Image (tube, coloured by chain):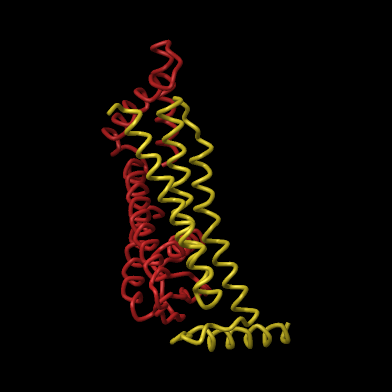
Chain colours: A red, B yellow
């Protein structure tokens, strides 16, 4: 993958050299043309075409932003209720992610999604202890978002 | 109505939304019962509020002055990276030093496991 990105940068530079125009626009055009070449020749590179990875990163970011907006609305809905009616609690969740970086990403994202904050992690057992603002109401949605994020993170990292 | 007026309205709406979000989450600090639920208000809504304000500023400078300020985008990125970590550390250390959950809490699956973990750690440190 590193090889593909490097090669693509070189193609962009060569395109600038050939045109003798040193600006961002020419470089971008060259980079895009290089990307098309690498996509056409992807069979001959080790590993997958790196555009797929970039696409999955974009998907992860989009998913994350949608969940963030939803979670803020939920929290504000709870706060502005005239009578505070929440039942906070801590529950366990198992994760299938293994490496440190994957778990860090999942933790960071769960911290910013509906009614959940990660309290403690046991990486060896793959268990996360999550504090939820309203256990009864949010447990289902937290499990669902966790699964969504896991899928997206695995797609990005592996 | 020309373009700059439309941009101005968009920017105004975004900055206002960010401010309202920040205001509401600071209201949450006062109303919520314990530190764990307060950290929810501190991490989520505030982050989104900052996102809106900085993005509004970015759009304003881009369309009004033709200035693309990468620093504003970096600000968003770093707030997103640090706010959840800070929230996690605050509640983790609070739990470990024995801050109680509020009375309305219904569930605590961590307490027993943490006890076991601590016993294990003590056992291992004696062995070593």
Task: List x then y, in percent, for residue B84.
Answer: 51, 61
Q: Say which residue appears at 45% left-offset and 37% top-offset.
A: B58
- Which sits in the foreground, A84 or B109? A84
Task: Identify the image quadrant of residue B48.
Answer: bottom left
Nearest the camera: A33 or B69? Answer: B69
Q: Position of residue A125 (x, y in %)?
A: 48, 76
Q: Residue at x 54, y 83 (%)?
A: B101
Residue A43's quadrant in the figure? top left
**Residue B34 relative to residue B14: left or right:** right
Q: Quadrant of the N terminus of chain A?
A: top left
Say if residue B84 shows up in the picture: yes
At a point 35% along the width and 34% down the height, the residue shown is B7
Against A122, residue B44 (above or below) is above
Residue sitting nearer the eye, A1 or A142: A142
Q: Quadrant of the C terminus of chain A?
A: bottom left
B90 sits left or right of B84 in the view: right
Residue at (39% x, 74% y) in the render: A82
Residue A79 x, y percent position in the rendering: 42, 69
Q: Residue furthest top?
A: A20
Q: Work out whether residue A102 can be spotted.
A: no
Please tell me whether residue A113 is drawn above or below residue A61 in the rendered image. below
Observer-nearest residue: B22 or A58? Answer: B22
Residue A147, x across and y down, in percent: 33, 67
- Give the mark count: 0
């Amino acid at each position: 993958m590193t090889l593909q990105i490097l090669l693509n940068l070189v193609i962009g530079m060569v395109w600038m050299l050939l045109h003798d125009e040193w600006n961002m626009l020419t470089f971008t055009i060259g980079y895009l043309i290089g990307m098309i070449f690498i996509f056409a020749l992807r069979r001959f590179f080790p590993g997958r075409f790196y555009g797929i990875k970039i696409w999955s990163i974009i998907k992860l970011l989009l998913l994350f932003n949608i969940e963030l907006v939803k979670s803020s609305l939920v929290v504000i809905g709870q706060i502005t209720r005239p009578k505070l009616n929440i039942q906070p609690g801590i529950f366990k969740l198992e994760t299938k992610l293994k490496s440190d970086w994957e778990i860090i990403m999942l933790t960071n994202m769960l911290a910013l999604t509906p009614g959940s904050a990660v309290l403690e992690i046991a990486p060896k057992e793959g268990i996360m202890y999550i504090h939820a603002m309203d256990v009864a109401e949010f447990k289902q949605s937290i499990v669902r978002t966790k699964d969504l994020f896991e899928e997206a993170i695995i797609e990005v990292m592996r | 109505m020309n373009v700059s007026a439309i941009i101005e309205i968009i920017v105004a709406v975004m900055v206002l939304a960010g401010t309202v979000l920040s205001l509401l989450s600071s209201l949450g600090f006062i109303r919520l019962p314990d530190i764990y639920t307060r950290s929810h208000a501190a991490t989520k809504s505030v982050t989104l509020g900052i996102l809106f304000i900085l993005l509004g500023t970015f759009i304003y400078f881009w369309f009004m002055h033709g200035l693309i300020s990468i620093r504003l985008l970096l600000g968003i990125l770093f707030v997103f990276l640090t706010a959840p970590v800070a929230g996690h550390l605050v509640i983790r250390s609070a739990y470990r030093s024995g801050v109680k959950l509020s009375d309305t809490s219904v569930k605590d699956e961590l307490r027993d496991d943490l006890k076991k973990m601590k016993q294990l750690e003590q056992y291992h440190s004696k062995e070593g």
